[in-house]
Image: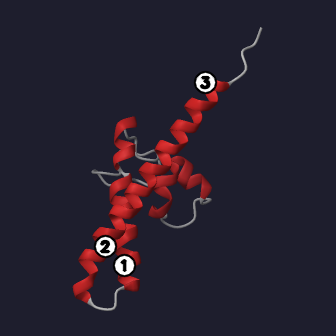
Amino acid sequence: MIVPLPGFLAHLDWNPLWQAMGGAGAALLAWVPFVNPVKLPAGARLWMYLPLTLCIAVVYRATRARSLEKLPRGTLLTFVNITVGMIAIAVAFYVVSRAALYLRPVSA
């Protein structure tokens, strides 16, 4: 069985990971988030969108930029475009869902 070091990963239950690997080798740490995901409050999960979008914008612009001087501005514009687009999509879905609830047939 794996004996975790004291610290960040010490609270995790290593038995499912150990059994999934068949006891072979040291635990693949890449499996840990899937076996024991980090518990986040409901409000904090939404804020994880911003760093994800920023990472996507940086990587996208790094592959598209012709010079390093254009990278920060292009990254910021891409980040804002993605974020505003996702907010617009969320608002549109909210309006459609409220309209569907308003227009639903009334059961007798």
Specify the quadrant of the image occupied by residue 46: top left
Quadrant position of the C terminus in the picture: top right
Q: Is there a contact, CB below 8 Å, between mark 3 and mark 1?
A: no
Q: Which residue is mark 1?
A: 61
Depth check: give the residue in front, 37 or 90. 90
Please, what is the three-letter code of the amino acid marked with disc 2?
Thr
Q: Is there a contact, CB below 8 Å, between mark 1 and mark 2?
A: yes
Camera-side mark, 3 or 1: 3
Position of residue 62 in the picture relative to residue 104 (left or right): left
Specify the quadrant of the image occupied by residue 29: bottom left
Question: Residue 92, image x and y in percent?
Answer: 52, 44
Q: Which residue is mark 3?
A: 102
Q: Who's the residue at 42% across and 49% down the image?
A: 87
Tag 1 or tag 3, which sits nearer the N-term?
A: 1
Depth check: give the residue in front, 29 or 98. 98
Give the SS element for disc 1: helix
Question: Residue 19, image x and y in percent?
Answer: 60, 52
> Which residue in the rendered view is the most extreme toward the left?
69
* Disc marking residue 76: none
Q: Which residue is mark 2?
A: 75
Question: Residue 2, image x and y in percent?
Answer: 45, 55
